[in-house]
Amino acid sequence: MKESFLGQLALLGSIVNPSLAASEPSRPRGVSPEFSKFYKSTDGFACISNPSIEVALSQVNDDYCDCPDGSDEPGTSACSHLSPLSPRSPIIITDDDDNITVSLPGFYCKNKGHQPSYLPFTNVNDGICDYDLCCDGSDEWEGVGGVKCEDKCKEIGKEWRKHDEQRQKSMSTANRKRKELVLEAARRRMEVEDRIRSLGEEITALEFKATTLEKQLVEVERKEKFKVVTGGGQGGKLGILASLAKNRITELSSSLSRVRNERDSTRERLNELEGILTRFKEEYNPNFNDEGVKRAVRAWENYAARDKGSDDNAALDRDLDEILKPDAENGLNWEEFEEADQSDVDVLYQFEAYLPGPVREWVDQKLRDLRTTLIENGILAGPKDDAQESKAVIEARQAVTDARNHVENYKRDRQNHKDDLEKDYGPDDVFRALKGQCIDKDAGEYNYEFCFLDKTTQKPKKGGSNTGMGNFVRIEKVMVDEDVPPDGKGLGSGERIALKYENGQHCWNGPNRSTTVILACAEKDELWKIVEEEKCVYRMEVGTPAACGYDSSGKTSPPPRDEL
Ligand code: MAN
Protein backbone atom coordinates (compact mmCIF):
# COMPACT_ATOMS: atom_id res chain seq x y z
CA MET A 1 0.00 0.00 0.00
CA LYS A 2 1.49 3.26 -1.06
CA GLU A 3 -0.75 5.98 0.32
CA SER A 4 0.28 7.26 3.73
CA PHE A 5 -1.88 6.55 6.71
CA LEU A 6 -3.43 10.02 6.86
CA GLY A 7 -3.80 10.17 3.12
CA GLN A 8 -5.64 6.84 3.03
CA LEU A 9 -7.97 7.85 5.79
CA ALA A 10 -8.80 11.05 4.03
CA LEU A 11 -9.50 9.11 0.85
CA LEU A 12 -11.49 6.39 2.50
CA GLY A 13 -13.40 8.97 4.46
CA SER A 14 -14.88 9.97 1.16
CA ILE A 15 -15.79 6.40 0.20
CA VAL A 16 -17.65 5.69 3.41
CA ASN A 17 -20.61 7.97 3.87
CA PRO A 18 -20.00 9.35 7.39
CA SER A 19 -23.63 10.36 7.86
CA LEU A 20 -24.61 6.71 7.81
CA ALA A 21 -21.98 5.76 10.37
CA ALA A 22 -23.82 7.08 13.39
CA SER A 23 -26.14 4.94 15.55
CA GLU A 24 -27.15 2.07 13.31
CA PRO A 25 -29.07 -0.99 14.52
CA SER A 26 -26.83 -4.00 14.89
CA ARG A 27 -25.48 -5.24 11.59
CA PRO A 28 -23.43 -8.29 10.83
CA ARG A 29 -19.73 -7.76 11.51
CA GLY A 30 -17.93 -5.88 8.78
CA VAL A 31 -21.08 -4.41 7.16
CA SER A 32 -21.16 -0.68 6.60
CA PRO A 33 -24.35 1.38 7.03
CA GLU A 34 -24.70 1.73 3.28
CA PHE A 35 -24.90 -2.06 2.83
CA SER A 36 -26.96 -2.82 5.96
CA LYS A 37 -30.20 -2.94 3.96
CA PHE A 38 -29.04 -6.21 2.35
CA TYR A 39 -28.72 -7.86 5.75
CA LYS A 40 -32.13 -6.91 7.24
CA SER A 41 -34.20 -9.98 6.32
CA THR A 42 -34.83 -12.41 9.12
CA ASP A 43 -35.66 -15.29 6.73
CA GLY A 44 -32.31 -15.67 5.13
CA PHE A 45 -29.68 -13.78 3.15
CA ALA A 46 -29.85 -13.13 -0.61
CA CYS A 47 -26.38 -12.69 -2.16
CA ILE A 48 -26.09 -9.03 -3.10
CA SER A 49 -25.03 -9.46 -6.73
CA ASN A 50 -26.97 -12.66 -7.23
CA PRO A 51 -30.21 -12.28 -5.20
CA SER A 52 -31.59 -15.55 -6.62
CA ILE A 53 -29.04 -17.33 -4.47
CA GLU A 54 -30.18 -17.39 -0.86
CA VAL A 55 -28.29 -18.71 2.11
CA ALA A 56 -29.37 -19.22 5.72
CA LEU A 57 -28.64 -16.44 8.19
CA SER A 58 -26.32 -18.78 10.02
CA GLN A 59 -24.17 -18.88 6.90
CA VAL A 60 -23.42 -15.16 7.10
CA ASN A 61 -19.93 -14.69 8.55
CA ASP A 62 -19.50 -18.42 9.16
CA ASP A 63 -16.02 -18.16 7.59
CA TYR A 64 -17.15 -20.10 4.52
CA CYS A 65 -17.71 -18.43 1.15
CA ASP A 66 -21.19 -19.24 -0.14
CA CYS A 67 -22.18 -16.31 -2.37
CA PRO A 68 -20.47 -15.89 -5.75
CA ASP A 69 -19.81 -12.22 -4.88
CA GLY A 70 -18.61 -13.04 -1.35
CA SER A 71 -21.32 -10.89 0.23
CA ASP A 72 -22.18 -13.57 2.80
CA GLU A 73 -18.76 -13.02 4.44
CA PRO A 74 -18.58 -9.25 5.20
CA GLY A 75 -16.71 -9.80 8.46
CA THR A 76 -14.20 -12.56 7.63
CA SER A 77 -11.49 -13.15 5.07
CA ALA A 78 -13.21 -16.26 3.71
CA CYS A 79 -14.13 -14.59 0.41
CA SER A 80 -11.06 -12.37 0.16
CA HIS A 81 -10.03 -14.21 -3.01
CA LEU A 82 -13.11 -12.69 -4.69
CA SER A 83 -12.05 -9.14 -4.03
CA PRO A 84 -9.40 -8.36 -6.57
CA LEU A 85 -10.14 -4.69 -6.14
CA SER A 86 -8.70 -2.70 -3.31
CA PRO A 87 -11.10 -0.72 -1.11
CA ARG A 88 -9.94 2.40 -2.91
CA SER A 89 -11.28 1.11 -6.22
CA PRO A 90 -14.91 1.34 -7.26
CA ILE A 91 -17.13 -1.41 -5.96
CA ILE A 92 -18.82 -1.95 -9.31
CA ILE A 93 -17.68 -5.09 -11.12
CA THR A 94 -18.79 -6.69 -14.36
CA ASP A 95 -19.55 -10.37 -14.91
CA ASP A 96 -19.00 -12.40 -18.09
CA ASP A 97 -22.29 -11.20 -19.61
CA ASP A 98 -21.39 -7.61 -18.90
CA ASN A 99 -24.00 -7.35 -16.19
CA ILE A 100 -22.95 -4.84 -13.61
CA THR A 101 -22.87 -6.37 -10.14
CA VAL A 102 -22.07 -4.87 -6.80
CA SER A 103 -19.79 -6.43 -4.28
CA LEU A 104 -18.64 -5.32 -0.83
CA PRO A 105 -15.80 -2.82 -0.85
CA GLY A 106 -14.09 -4.34 2.19
CA PHE A 107 -14.35 -4.97 5.89
CA TYR A 108 -16.04 -2.00 7.50
CA CYS A 109 -14.26 -0.52 10.51
CA LYS A 110 -16.46 1.86 12.48
CA ASN A 111 -13.43 3.68 13.92
CA LYS A 112 -15.52 5.58 16.47
CA GLY A 113 -13.81 8.84 17.38
CA HIS A 114 -12.18 8.97 13.98
CA GLN A 115 -13.24 8.31 10.37
CA PRO A 116 -14.85 4.97 9.41
CA SER A 117 -13.09 3.09 6.62
CA TYR A 118 -12.89 -0.16 4.68
CA LEU A 119 -10.08 -2.65 5.12
CA PRO A 120 -9.21 -5.24 2.44
CA PHE A 121 -10.73 -8.61 3.42
CA THR A 122 -7.28 -10.21 3.25
CA ASN A 123 -6.27 -8.14 6.28
CA VAL A 124 -9.10 -9.43 8.47
CA ASN A 125 -7.85 -11.76 11.20
CA ASP A 126 -4.35 -11.93 9.75
CA GLY A 127 -2.82 -11.39 13.18
CA ILE A 128 -1.71 -7.80 12.42
CA CYS A 129 -3.34 -4.68 13.81
CA ASP A 130 -4.06 -2.50 10.81
CA TYR A 131 -4.28 0.76 12.73
CA ASP A 132 -3.80 2.85 9.62
CA LEU A 133 -7.21 1.75 8.36
CA CYS A 134 -8.83 0.17 11.37
CA CYS A 135 -7.89 2.28 14.36
CA ASP A 136 -10.51 0.55 16.52
CA GLY A 137 -8.73 -2.82 16.08
CA SER A 138 -12.00 -4.52 15.06
CA ASP A 139 -10.29 -6.31 12.15
CA GLU A 140 -8.56 -8.71 14.56
CA TRP A 141 -11.70 -9.84 16.37
CA GLU A 142 -10.63 -13.46 16.31
CA GLY A 143 -7.39 -12.86 18.20
CA VAL A 144 -5.36 -14.98 15.83
CA GLY A 145 -2.07 -15.95 17.49
CA GLY A 146 -3.22 -14.16 20.63
CA VAL A 147 -3.14 -10.79 18.97
CA LYS A 148 -5.25 -8.19 20.66
CA CYS A 149 -5.72 -4.80 18.99
CA GLU A 150 -6.84 -2.15 21.41
CA ASP A 151 -8.99 0.73 20.18
CA LYS A 152 -6.66 3.68 19.37
CA CYS A 153 -9.19 5.80 17.48
CA LYS A 154 -9.31 8.54 20.12
CA GLU A 155 -5.63 9.44 19.92
CA ILE A 156 -5.26 8.69 16.22
CA GLY A 157 -8.41 10.70 15.46
CA LYS A 158 -7.13 13.65 17.52
CA GLU A 159 -3.81 13.63 15.75
CA TRP A 160 -5.54 13.28 12.38
CA ARG A 161 -7.87 16.20 13.08
CA LYS A 162 -4.92 18.38 14.04
CA HIS A 163 -3.19 17.53 10.79
CA ASP A 164 -6.38 17.86 8.85
CA GLU A 165 -6.96 21.32 10.21
CA GLN A 166 -3.48 22.36 9.11
CA ARG A 167 -4.02 20.74 5.74
CA GLN A 168 -7.36 22.50 5.29
CA LYS A 169 -5.77 25.83 6.18
CA SER A 170 -2.92 25.22 3.84
CA MET A 171 -5.27 24.14 1.05
CA SER A 172 -7.45 27.17 1.61
CA THR A 173 -4.37 29.45 1.31
CA ALA A 174 -3.25 27.51 -1.75
CA ASN A 175 -6.68 27.87 -3.36
CA ARG A 176 -6.75 31.57 -2.61
CA LYS A 177 -3.32 31.94 -4.21
CA ARG A 178 -4.51 30.02 -7.23
CA LYS A 179 -7.44 32.38 -7.62
CA GLU A 180 -4.99 35.28 -7.54
CA LEU A 181 -2.88 33.56 -10.18
CA VAL A 182 -5.93 33.05 -12.39
CA LEU A 183 -6.79 36.75 -12.04
CA GLU A 184 -3.21 37.71 -12.90
CA ALA A 185 -3.31 35.35 -15.88
CA ALA A 186 -6.54 36.99 -17.09
CA ARG A 187 -4.95 40.41 -16.70
CA ARG A 188 -1.94 39.33 -18.74
CA ARG A 189 -4.20 37.83 -21.42
CA MET A 190 -6.01 41.15 -21.64
CA GLU A 191 -2.70 42.92 -21.98
CA VAL A 192 -1.86 40.70 -24.94
CA GLU A 193 -5.29 41.33 -26.48
CA ASP A 194 -4.84 45.09 -26.01
CA ARG A 195 -1.41 44.93 -27.60
CA ILE A 196 -2.84 43.06 -30.59
CA ARG A 197 -5.47 45.78 -30.96
CA SER A 198 -3.00 48.65 -30.68
CA LEU A 199 -0.58 46.91 -33.06
CA GLY A 200 -3.47 46.60 -35.52
CA GLU A 201 -4.07 50.35 -35.35
CA GLU A 202 -0.38 51.10 -35.70
CA ILE A 203 -0.12 48.74 -38.66
CA THR A 204 -3.01 50.52 -40.42
CA ALA A 205 -1.32 53.89 -39.89
CA LEU A 206 2.07 52.56 -40.98
CA GLU A 207 0.60 50.94 -44.08
CA PHE A 208 -1.00 54.23 -44.99
CA LYS A 209 2.34 55.96 -44.50
CA ALA A 210 4.11 53.32 -46.61
CA THR A 211 1.55 53.70 -49.42
CA THR A 212 1.96 57.47 -49.34
CA LEU A 213 5.73 57.11 -49.46
CA GLU A 214 5.39 54.68 -52.37
CA LYS A 215 3.36 57.26 -54.27
CA GLN A 216 5.95 59.88 -53.42
CA LEU A 217 8.69 57.57 -54.68
CA VAL A 218 6.89 57.10 -58.02
CA GLU A 219 6.56 60.85 -58.29
CA VAL A 220 10.20 61.52 -57.36
CA GLU A 221 11.35 58.80 -59.76
CA ARG A 222 9.30 60.38 -62.51
CA LYS A 223 10.70 63.79 -61.78
CA GLU A 224 14.23 62.62 -61.35
CA LYS A 225 14.18 60.12 -64.19
CA PHE A 226 15.79 62.51 -66.58
CA LYS A 227 17.77 64.48 -64.11
CA VAL A 228 20.53 62.11 -63.26
CA VAL A 229 23.47 63.01 -61.10
CA THR A 230 26.99 61.89 -61.80
CA GLY A 231 29.23 60.33 -59.15
CA GLY A 232 30.86 62.87 -56.84
CA GLY A 233 28.50 65.61 -57.94
CA GLN A 234 31.24 67.33 -60.02
CA GLY A 235 29.31 67.56 -63.26
CA GLY A 236 31.13 68.05 -66.60
CA LYS A 237 33.03 71.12 -67.68
CA LEU A 238 29.99 73.11 -66.79
CA GLY A 239 30.12 71.77 -63.26
CA ILE A 240 33.76 72.84 -62.91
CA LEU A 241 32.98 76.20 -64.41
CA ALA A 242 30.02 76.63 -62.08
CA SER A 243 32.21 75.73 -59.16
CA LEU A 244 34.89 78.26 -60.18
CA ALA A 245 32.26 80.92 -60.84
CA LYS A 246 30.70 80.31 -57.46
CA ASN A 247 34.07 80.75 -55.73
CA ARG A 248 34.88 83.84 -57.74
CA ILE A 249 31.51 85.42 -57.01
CA THR A 250 31.86 84.64 -53.36
CA GLU A 251 35.29 86.30 -53.38
CA LEU A 252 34.06 89.40 -55.23
CA SER A 253 31.04 89.70 -52.98
CA SER A 254 33.14 89.71 -49.86
CA SER A 255 35.58 92.27 -51.37
CA LEU A 256 32.69 94.47 -52.38
CA SER A 257 31.24 94.23 -48.95
CA ARG A 258 34.59 95.18 -47.37
CA VAL A 259 35.10 98.16 -49.72
CA ARG A 260 31.59 99.35 -48.98
CA ASN A 261 32.29 99.31 -45.26
CA GLU A 262 35.52 101.28 -45.77
CA ARG A 263 33.64 103.79 -47.91
CA ASP A 264 31.04 104.26 -45.20
CA SER A 265 33.62 104.93 -42.51
CA THR A 266 35.58 107.36 -44.77
CA ARG A 267 32.30 109.14 -45.49
CA GLU A 268 31.68 109.59 -41.80
CA ARG A 269 35.16 111.04 -41.22
CA LEU A 270 34.69 113.47 -44.14
CA ASN A 271 31.35 114.67 -42.73
CA GLU A 272 32.98 115.24 -39.37
CA LEU A 273 35.81 117.22 -40.97
CA GLU A 274 33.47 119.36 -43.08
CA GLY A 275 31.50 120.13 -39.93
CA ILE A 276 34.68 121.34 -38.19
CA LEU A 277 35.62 123.60 -41.11
CA THR A 278 32.07 124.99 -41.41
CA ARG A 279 32.13 125.94 -37.72
CA PHE A 280 35.66 127.39 -38.20
CA LYS A 281 34.50 129.65 -41.04
CA GLU A 282 31.51 130.86 -39.06
CA GLU A 283 33.39 131.50 -35.88
CA TYR A 284 36.74 132.97 -37.02
CA ASN A 285 37.42 136.76 -36.43
CA PRO A 286 38.02 138.53 -39.83
CA ASN A 287 39.32 141.61 -37.97
CA PHE A 288 42.46 139.77 -37.11
CA ASN A 289 44.58 140.36 -40.13
CA ASP A 290 45.94 136.82 -40.27
CA GLU A 291 46.77 136.08 -43.85
CA GLY A 292 47.07 132.32 -43.30
CA VAL A 293 43.61 132.07 -41.74
CA LYS A 294 42.08 134.17 -44.51
CA ARG A 295 43.62 131.89 -47.13
CA ALA A 296 42.27 128.79 -45.46
CA VAL A 297 38.76 130.26 -45.27
CA ARG A 298 38.82 131.16 -48.90
CA ALA A 299 39.98 127.71 -49.88
CA TRP A 300 37.17 126.15 -47.79
CA GLU A 301 34.60 128.46 -49.51
CA ASN A 302 35.86 127.34 -52.91
CA TYR A 303 35.69 123.68 -51.86
CA ALA A 304 32.16 124.07 -50.44
CA ALA A 305 30.93 125.90 -53.57
CA ARG A 306 32.09 123.07 -55.82
CA ASP A 307 29.42 120.72 -57.27
CA LYS A 308 29.32 117.52 -55.19
CA GLY A 309 27.51 115.62 -57.93
CA SER A 310 24.03 114.10 -57.77
CA ASP A 311 22.97 112.46 -54.57
CA ASP A 312 22.77 108.90 -55.93
CA ASN A 313 24.12 107.24 -52.83
CA ALA A 314 20.76 105.78 -51.84
CA ALA A 315 20.20 104.18 -55.26
CA LEU A 316 23.73 102.88 -55.33
CA ASP A 317 23.29 101.35 -51.91
CA ARG A 318 20.11 99.65 -52.99
CA ASP A 319 21.98 98.13 -55.90
CA LEU A 320 24.76 96.99 -53.65
CA ASP A 321 22.19 95.45 -51.26
CA GLU A 322 20.77 93.45 -54.15
CA ILE A 323 24.17 92.33 -55.32
CA LEU A 324 25.23 91.25 -51.86
CA LYS A 325 22.10 89.16 -51.20
CA PRO A 326 22.73 85.37 -50.77
CA ASP A 327 22.92 83.56 -54.15
CA ALA A 328 19.76 81.58 -53.55
CA GLU A 329 17.78 84.81 -53.17
CA ASN A 330 19.11 85.91 -56.48
CA GLY A 331 17.74 82.72 -58.04
CA LEU A 332 21.17 81.15 -58.31
CA ASN A 333 21.14 77.40 -57.45
CA TRP A 334 24.77 76.37 -57.78
CA GLU A 335 24.04 72.72 -56.88
CA GLU A 336 21.82 72.38 -59.88
CA PHE A 337 24.71 73.39 -62.13
CA GLU A 338 27.33 71.50 -60.18
CA GLU A 339 25.36 68.21 -60.29
CA ALA A 340 23.72 68.42 -63.65
CA ASP A 341 25.00 65.83 -66.04
CA GLN A 342 24.22 67.82 -69.06
CA SER A 343 26.42 68.90 -71.82
CA ASP A 344 27.41 72.52 -71.58
CA VAL A 345 25.64 73.13 -74.80
CA ASP A 346 22.40 71.81 -73.28
CA VAL A 347 22.63 74.48 -70.67
CA LEU A 348 23.02 77.21 -73.23
CA TYR A 349 19.78 76.03 -74.73
CA GLN A 350 17.97 76.06 -71.41
CA PHE A 351 16.32 79.25 -72.30
CA GLU A 352 14.10 79.17 -69.20
CA ALA A 353 17.21 79.99 -67.17
CA TYR A 354 17.00 83.47 -68.64
CA LEU A 355 13.42 83.98 -67.47
CA PRO A 356 12.29 85.69 -64.24
CA GLY A 357 12.09 83.35 -61.18
CA PRO A 358 8.41 82.30 -60.95
CA VAL A 359 7.97 82.07 -64.72
CA ARG A 360 11.14 80.05 -64.96
CA GLU A 361 9.90 77.50 -62.42
CA TRP A 362 6.59 77.06 -64.20
CA VAL A 363 8.23 76.70 -67.62
CA ASP A 364 10.84 74.38 -66.20
CA GLN A 365 8.22 72.02 -64.77
CA LYS A 366 6.22 71.99 -67.97
CA LEU A 367 9.31 71.21 -69.99
CA ARG A 368 10.30 68.37 -67.67
CA ASP A 369 6.82 66.88 -67.92
CA LEU A 370 6.86 67.17 -71.67
CA ARG A 371 10.29 65.57 -71.91
CA THR A 372 9.20 62.71 -69.64
CA THR A 373 6.11 62.06 -71.73
CA LEU A 374 8.13 62.11 -74.94
CA ILE A 375 10.66 59.63 -73.57
CA GLU A 376 7.96 57.41 -72.09
CA ASN A 377 6.32 57.25 -75.46
CA GLY A 378 9.54 56.42 -77.25
CA ILE A 379 9.78 59.75 -79.05
CA LEU A 380 12.94 60.89 -77.26
CA ALA A 381 15.84 58.70 -76.09
CA GLY A 382 15.95 58.03 -72.33
CA PRO A 383 18.87 58.56 -69.99
CA LYS A 384 21.87 56.22 -70.01
CA ASP A 385 21.32 52.83 -68.28
CA ASP A 386 24.42 53.07 -66.16
CA ALA A 387 23.26 56.31 -64.71
CA GLN A 388 23.15 56.44 -60.93
CA GLU A 389 19.96 57.24 -59.09
CA SER A 390 19.68 60.71 -57.69
CA LYS A 391 19.95 61.37 -53.98
CA ALA A 392 16.25 62.25 -53.89
CA VAL A 393 15.22 58.87 -55.40
CA ILE A 394 17.57 56.95 -53.13
CA GLU A 395 16.15 58.71 -50.10
CA ALA A 396 12.55 58.24 -51.22
CA ARG A 397 13.17 54.53 -51.89
CA GLN A 398 14.88 54.11 -48.52
CA ALA A 399 11.90 55.76 -46.82
CA VAL A 400 9.57 53.23 -48.52
CA THR A 401 11.81 50.29 -47.54
CA ASP A 402 11.99 51.53 -43.95
CA ALA A 403 8.22 51.98 -43.76
CA ARG A 404 7.60 48.50 -45.26
CA ASN A 405 10.08 46.91 -42.84
CA HIS A 406 8.38 48.72 -40.03
CA VAL A 407 5.00 47.31 -41.09
CA GLU A 408 6.45 43.79 -41.37
CA ASN A 409 8.03 43.98 -37.89
CA TYR A 410 4.75 45.11 -36.39
CA LYS A 411 2.87 42.34 -38.20
CA ARG A 412 5.33 39.74 -36.93
CA ASP A 413 4.96 41.09 -33.44
CA ARG A 414 1.17 40.94 -33.73
CA GLN A 415 1.29 37.35 -35.03
CA ASN A 416 3.49 36.33 -32.11
CA HIS A 417 0.97 37.79 -29.71
CA LYS A 418 -1.88 36.03 -31.53
CA ASP A 419 -0.03 32.71 -31.35
CA ASP A 420 0.54 33.30 -27.69
CA LEU A 421 -3.21 33.62 -27.10
CA GLU A 422 -3.69 30.20 -28.74
CA LYS A 423 -1.01 28.51 -26.63
CA ASP A 424 -1.97 26.07 -23.89
CA TYR A 425 -1.31 27.72 -20.55
CA GLY A 426 -3.06 25.01 -18.55
CA PRO A 427 -6.43 25.00 -16.75
CA ASP A 428 -7.84 28.54 -16.46
CA ASP A 429 -4.76 29.82 -18.31
CA VAL A 430 -3.12 29.74 -14.89
CA PHE A 431 0.50 29.23 -15.99
CA ARG A 432 0.35 32.48 -17.95
CA ALA A 433 0.81 34.18 -14.58
CA LEU A 434 3.87 32.10 -13.74
CA LYS A 435 5.66 31.88 -17.07
CA GLY A 436 9.38 32.49 -16.63
CA GLN A 437 9.31 32.34 -12.83
CA CYS A 438 11.98 30.05 -11.44
CA ILE A 439 12.56 27.99 -8.31
CA ASP A 440 15.56 25.88 -7.41
CA LYS A 441 16.77 23.13 -5.15
CA ASP A 442 20.13 22.06 -3.88
CA ALA A 443 20.52 18.33 -4.53
CA GLY A 444 23.85 16.47 -4.32
CA GLU A 445 26.43 17.79 -6.73
CA TYR A 446 24.04 20.20 -8.37
CA ASN A 447 21.63 23.01 -7.89
CA TYR A 448 18.58 22.36 -10.02
CA GLU A 449 16.49 25.16 -11.42
CA PHE A 450 13.00 24.89 -12.82
CA CYS A 451 11.40 27.81 -14.64
CA PHE A 452 7.68 27.63 -15.38
CA LEU A 453 7.05 27.16 -19.10
CA ASP A 454 10.64 28.07 -19.88
CA LYS A 455 13.57 25.71 -19.08
CA THR A 456 15.14 23.40 -16.54
CA THR A 457 18.83 23.67 -15.63
CA GLN A 458 21.46 21.68 -13.80
CA LYS A 459 24.08 23.92 -12.15
CA PRO A 460 27.22 22.24 -10.79
CA LYS A 461 28.01 23.46 -7.29
CA LYS A 462 31.75 23.02 -7.75
CA GLY A 463 31.87 25.37 -10.73
CA GLY A 464 31.75 24.65 -14.43
CA SER A 465 29.08 25.51 -16.89
CA ASN A 466 25.36 24.93 -16.44
CA THR A 467 23.62 22.13 -18.29
CA GLY A 468 20.29 22.70 -20.02
CA MET A 469 17.89 19.92 -19.04
CA GLY A 470 15.25 20.87 -21.56
CA ASN A 471 13.08 23.67 -22.88
CA PHE A 472 9.36 23.78 -22.29
CA VAL A 473 7.31 22.16 -25.05
CA ARG A 474 3.84 21.29 -23.75
CA ILE A 475 1.51 20.55 -20.87
CA GLU A 476 0.42 16.94 -20.32
CA LYS A 477 -1.53 14.86 -17.83
CA VAL A 478 0.04 11.93 -16.02
CA MET A 479 -1.26 9.37 -13.55
CA VAL A 480 0.68 9.04 -10.33
CA ASP A 481 0.34 6.76 -7.34
CA GLU A 482 2.75 7.76 -4.64
CA ASP A 483 3.14 8.07 -0.91
CA VAL A 484 2.60 11.51 0.48
CA PRO A 485 5.19 12.17 3.20
CA PRO A 486 3.99 13.62 6.54
CA ASP A 487 5.06 17.13 5.44
CA GLY A 488 2.62 16.82 2.52
CA LYS A 489 5.35 17.45 -0.09
CA GLY A 490 4.44 14.64 -2.44
CA LEU A 491 2.38 13.92 -5.53
CA GLY A 492 -0.14 11.47 -4.00
CA SER A 493 -2.40 9.48 -6.28
CA GLY A 494 -4.44 10.39 -9.33
CA GLU A 495 -4.10 12.50 -12.41
CA ARG A 496 -1.61 15.35 -12.25
CA ILE A 497 -0.43 18.13 -14.54
CA ALA A 498 2.99 17.55 -16.06
CA LEU A 499 5.12 20.12 -17.84
CA LYS A 500 7.34 18.59 -20.49
CA TYR A 501 10.79 20.02 -21.20
CA GLU A 502 12.72 18.61 -24.14
CA ASN A 503 15.77 19.18 -26.33
CA GLY A 504 18.15 20.09 -23.55
CA GLN A 505 21.92 19.74 -23.84
CA HIS A 506 22.99 16.57 -25.60
CA CYS A 507 24.04 13.77 -23.30
CA TRP A 508 27.29 12.02 -24.20
CA ASN A 509 26.34 8.60 -25.52
CA GLY A 510 22.73 9.34 -24.81
CA PRO A 511 19.73 11.48 -25.77
CA ASN A 512 19.23 15.19 -25.52
CA ARG A 513 18.39 15.94 -21.93
CA SER A 514 14.70 16.16 -21.05
CA THR A 515 12.66 16.74 -17.91
CA THR A 516 9.12 15.90 -16.89
CA VAL A 517 7.94 18.24 -14.16
CA ILE A 518 4.95 16.86 -12.28
CA LEU A 519 2.94 19.35 -10.30
CA ALA A 520 0.89 18.94 -7.15
CA CYS A 521 -1.16 21.44 -5.18
CA ALA A 522 0.81 23.25 -2.47
CA GLU A 523 0.75 26.50 -0.59
CA LYS A 524 3.87 27.85 -2.28
CA ASP A 525 6.00 27.13 -5.34
CA GLU A 526 8.61 24.61 -4.29
CA LEU A 527 10.88 22.13 -6.04
CA TRP A 528 10.44 19.04 -3.90
CA LYS A 529 12.39 16.33 -5.61
CA ILE A 530 14.63 15.64 -8.63
CA VAL A 531 15.29 12.14 -9.95
CA GLU A 532 17.36 11.10 -12.96
CA GLU A 533 15.10 8.25 -14.03
CA GLU A 534 17.31 7.20 -16.90
CA LYS A 535 20.54 8.67 -18.18
CA CYS A 536 19.76 12.33 -18.87
CA VAL A 537 16.02 11.84 -18.46
CA TYR A 538 14.93 13.73 -15.39
CA ARG A 539 11.79 14.01 -13.37
CA MET A 540 10.99 16.85 -11.01
CA GLU A 541 8.22 17.00 -8.45
CA VAL A 542 7.00 20.50 -7.80
CA GLY A 543 4.42 21.91 -5.42
CA THR A 544 2.53 24.98 -6.60
CA PRO A 545 -0.81 26.68 -5.91
CA ALA A 546 -1.29 26.69 -9.69
CA ALA A 547 -1.96 22.93 -9.60
CA CYS A 548 -4.70 23.15 -6.96
CA GLY A 549 -8.28 22.13 -7.69
CA TYR A 550 -7.27 20.11 -10.70
CA ASP A 551 -9.28 16.92 -11.10
CA SER A 552 -9.13 13.98 -13.45
CA SER A 553 -11.43 15.57 -16.04
CA GLY A 554 -8.84 18.24 -16.60
CA LYS A 555 -11.14 20.95 -15.32
CA THR A 556 -11.01 22.76 -12.06
CA SER A 557 -13.11 21.38 -9.27
CA PRO A 558 -15.52 23.41 -7.13
CA PRO A 559 -13.93 25.59 -4.48
CA PRO A 560 -13.00 23.92 -1.20
CA ARG A 561 -15.62 23.63 1.49
CA ASP A 562 -14.47 26.52 3.65
CA GLU A 563 -14.89 28.87 0.73
CA LEU A 564 -18.42 27.88 -0.14
C1 MAN B 1 26.32 15.08 -16.21
C2 MAN B 1 24.98 15.27 -15.60
C3 MAN B 1 24.31 13.98 -15.26
C4 MAN B 1 24.32 13.07 -16.46
C5 MAN B 1 25.69 12.94 -17.04
C6 MAN B 1 25.66 12.13 -18.33
O1 MAN B 1 27.20 14.58 -15.27
O2 MAN B 1 24.21 15.98 -16.52
O3 MAN B 1 22.99 14.19 -14.80
O4 MAN B 1 23.84 11.79 -16.13
O5 MAN B 1 26.22 14.20 -17.31
O6 MAN B 1 26.91 12.01 -18.88
Image (spheres, grey):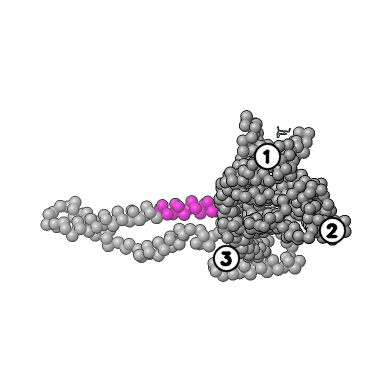
Image quarter for residue 256? bottom left
Q: Nearer the viewer, mark 3 or mark 1?
A: 1
Badge number at residue 53: 2
**Is the stretch drawn in magenta largely helix, strand or loop?**
helix
Given residues 198 and 467, the one toward you in this image is 467
Q: Residue at label 3?
A: 354
**Residue 1: image location, x then y, percent:** 72, 43
Q: Amino acid at mark 3?
A: Tyr
Q: Residue at label 1?
A: 148
Residue occupying image coordinates x 75% and y 51%: 74
User: In screen coordinates, is 433 left or right of 75?
Assistant: left
Spatial CA distance of label 1 from label 2 is 36 Å
Residue occupying image coordinates x 80% and y 52%: 59
Q: Amino acid at mark 2?
A: Ile
Q: Amino acid at mark 1?
A: Lys
**Residue 312: image location, x then y, percent:** 38, 64
How dense is the environment of label 3, judged by Cα within 10 Å: few (below 14), some, or many (20 and up)?
Answer: few
Image quarter for residue 321? bottom left
Task: Give the extent of the magenta segment.
Answer: 241-259
User: In screen coordinates, is 298 left or right of 539?
Assistant: left
How dense is the environment of label 1, judged by Cα within 10 Å: few (below 14), some, or many (20 and up)?
Answer: some
Is disc 1's CB within 8 Å of ligand 1?
no
Q: Is residue 549 visible?
A: yes
Residue at the extreme top:
462
Residue occupying image coordinates x 37% and y 52%: 262
Q: What is the secondary structure assignment of the residue under circle 1?
A: loop
> Can you tell me which quadrant of the image ligand 1 is in?
top right
Residue occupying image coordinates x 16% and y 58%: 283
Residue at the extreme left:
287
Q: What is the secondary structure assignment of the residue under circle 2?
A: loop
Q: Nearer the viewer, mark 2 or mark 3?
A: 2
Q: Earlier in the sequence, mark 1 or mark 2?
A: 2
